[in-house]
Amino acid sequence: MKVNRINHTGTSYTPSILLIEGLWGAGKSTLISRIRSRYPVLFIPEPNFQTSRVKKNISEWYKVQHQNRLKTALKYIRNGEQVVMERSILSNAAFYYAKCRKFPSWFNESKLSLQSVPRLHIVLLYPDKQTFKERVKFIKDRSVRRAVENHIRFYDNYIDFYKKIGLNIIFVKNHTNSSSNKIDPIFNKILEKKIRSKYQERVHHCSSAVVTFNKKILILYSQRHKQFTLPQGHQKNGESSIETIKREIAEETGFTDLNVIRPIRTYDFRFYINSGVTRKSTICYLVELKSLASSGKHMETHEAYKNYFVDCDDALRKLNWPEDRDNILSVQNKYLI
């Protein structure tokens, strides 16, 4: 793994906002998942024009979204929260630069807004050039995939953009193929300061499951959110975590003939909702279906899931949330091969 710092002022190693940028397939989601599991941060995810059903003026929509997300991040830090953001207005500008080899006309104003943020650290994740070429075919956005394929210097220009913008950047190459011990000290310094939040934290206990049948994994496709997930849900009053996951599997998939084998892992993450911070604490179980006997689905009105049985590699490609992928990786070698 190669790690470089440029334009570092040396004045502070404890920023209030950590911004994760990166090329597609560089491991942003995996890194953010690890950060959220180790530090009490608030996470602001990347906007997605597809799930938001935006069909026109997509570039302008992204710019507005990034501007609003930065305002939200500043609100959080004023209340004593550490913030992790996935992508920013820099992604828009880097994409334009990678295609045109020049800065967009609106970039200077956006750059000034970032320069005004106190204790901001920006991390750029990028794979080696050959790995990036191999991963281009997995980019879901067709317009992005075509842009990468049609511009031979896209990779070099994208990285060069971050070298030229004059902001405090931490360059991290091939972090997903390297020992976490090499990158974790960076974030220990960045997030080491313990900040007392002004928000009152609420705790929600949840259960999730890696459900297997004949060496296949059961994943659910949300017709509302257009993404895949594992069965999961909130624990009701008086329920144990095992009772919760049995109920959720029955409601969301219809399957009831099952055996809960063991807990896989427990993980927490925090998010801001309804004028307060919620900590979601989840226990994931390994569950085996003994048969496909079904009692029918009994989902709530906001839920609409379709069942899919897929192999392990396919599940890892399709699942939207890094926490779900981590759950599968935790049992992959012993139970799924």
Image (spheres, helix red, strand yellow):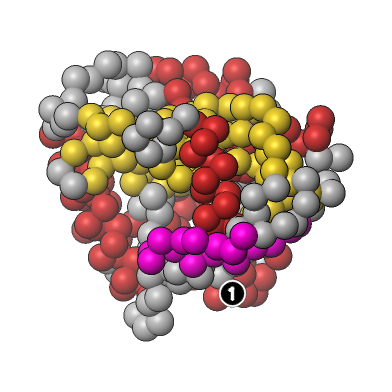
**Picture coordinates of residue 4, whole percent (x, y):** 52, 30
Residue furthest front in the image: 295
Q: In the picture provided, is 336 more to the left or to the right than 74? A: right
Q: Is residue 163 magenta?
A: no
For disc 1, the neighbor class at 10 Å (few under 14, some 14 to 19, many from 20) is: few
Q: Residue at x 24, y 46 (%)?
A: 273
Residue 284 vertical placement versus 109 (above, below): above
The boundaries of the magenta stretch are 295-310
Residue position for label 1: 142
Residue 209 occupies quadrant = top right
Q: Secondary structure at mark 1?
A: helix
**Picture coordinates of residue 29, whole percent (x, y):** 52, 44
Q: Residue at x 41, y 38 (%)?
A: 235
Q: Residue at x 78, y 51 (%)?
A: 291
Visible residue check, residue 219: yes
Residue 64 vertical placement versus 122 (above, below): below
Q: In the picture provided, is 334 more to the left or to the right than 226? A: right
**Picture coordinates of residue 229, whole percent (x, y):** 56, 53
